Image: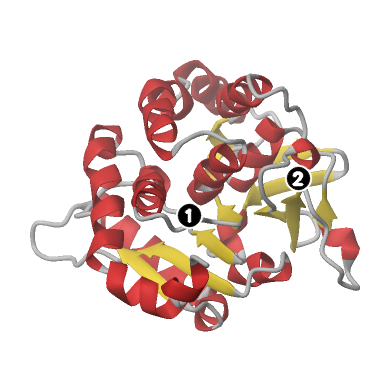
Amino acid sequence: MLGIALSGGGIRGIAHAGALKAFEDNNIKIDVIGGTSSGALVATLYALGYSPYYIFQTFKIYAKEIIGMNSSYVLSKIKSKFLGKEEEITGIKTGESLEKVYNKVAFRKGIKEISEIKKMPIVITAVDIKDGKEYIFTNCVPKVENKEKYITDIPIGKAVRASSSFPAIFCPCEFKEHSFYDGGVLDNVPVKEVKKQGANKVIAINFKADDVDNSSNIMDLGMRTLDIMGNKISEKNLEISDFILTIKTDKTGLFDIEKLDSCYKYGYETVIENLEKIKQVLGIDEYNK
């Protein structure tokens, strides 16, 4: 069984859809998928049965709605703070638009909660800011001792919102007694969890930390910092993967919506450039029997 673990990376996450398209074009079947943050956005749509190209088009249609900052919300938070109220500015986006979009696309497949996904096992990571622990949203709880960390009754929109609630940008996502933030806080590439779903080969897909130079701006520096942190956090997971596919996206910022097309292309091309190595790792002749 082949598993794919998709990392977070802001708008660059659409490169994962390009990578999935390249796998499909070369008859490489994916049996298990997992994702964190933007990786969770792509992984969920794929597990729901949507094609990589449809995922790409969905991102293009809804990106501004999901990412566009809600100025009235921000102003209300700032006003509350200046008026001396106890309410704190926990994020400049609620994440509700993302949740609604994903609930809508899931409903088109007749699915409400993650447990109802039948195409393949899926794992999505998030971190509860209250207890500092990682939780996994999945349709298939593995045979492990610590089953408390696995959640199966969460709505699709709520799951991806929780995994993608990047601190300071998005408010924490509340679900039952939990207060979830971005899964990348503890696990940016969920290789270990994909393996627990029975995958005997796992390809981890992450992003190259862009180089910085005299022309780099504050966003470039911020993205490089996030990439370094994400890859450092995921070192142990990356070590147990069978192949690491690192995508370079040419200084694409966290919310550079105008670079969706190029990121999709980068993902596709990176798989093609590494196709022979991937086939060798998978033992492709045996794999296709």
Percent x, y for residue 57?
37, 27
Residue 139 vs residue 119, the one in the foreground: 119
Task: Identify the mark at residue 8; answer none if there is no mark.
Answer: 1
Name the image quarter holding residue 111: top right
Residue 97 visible somewhere in the drawing: yes
43 above or below 72?
below
Quadrant in which the N terminus appears: bottom right
Vertical position of residue 145 compared to residue 266: above or below: below
Q: Amino acid at mark 1?
A: Gly
Who's the residue at 80% across and 41% down the image?
115
Disc 2 versus disc 1: distance between alpha carbons? Answer: 19 Å
* Disc 2 + disc 1, Cβ < 8 Å: no
Give x and y (percent) for residue 42. 50, 43
- In this view, the residue in front, 272 or 63, is 272
Q: Position of residue 175 (x, y in %)?
A: 80, 38
Mark 2 vs mark 1, foreground winner is 1
Residue 230's spot in the image, x, y percent? 47, 66
* Secondary element type, mark 2: strand
Density class for disc 2 (Cα within 10 Å; few <14, some 14-19, many ≥20) is some
Which mark is first along the chain, 1 or 2? 1
Q: Is 121 or 138 nearer to us in this picture?
A: 121
Q: Residue at x 31, y 53 (%)?
A: 267
Give left or right: position of 229 versus 246: right
Give the number of the disc on residue 179.
Answer: 2
In the rendered view, would you say 30 is above or below 47?
Answer: below
Tell me the quarter of the picture where residue 193 sits. bottom right
Image height of 200 relative to 250, above or below: below
Q: How is the image coloured?
A: secondary structure
Along the viewing direction, whichever of 73 and 56 lies nearer the viewer: 56
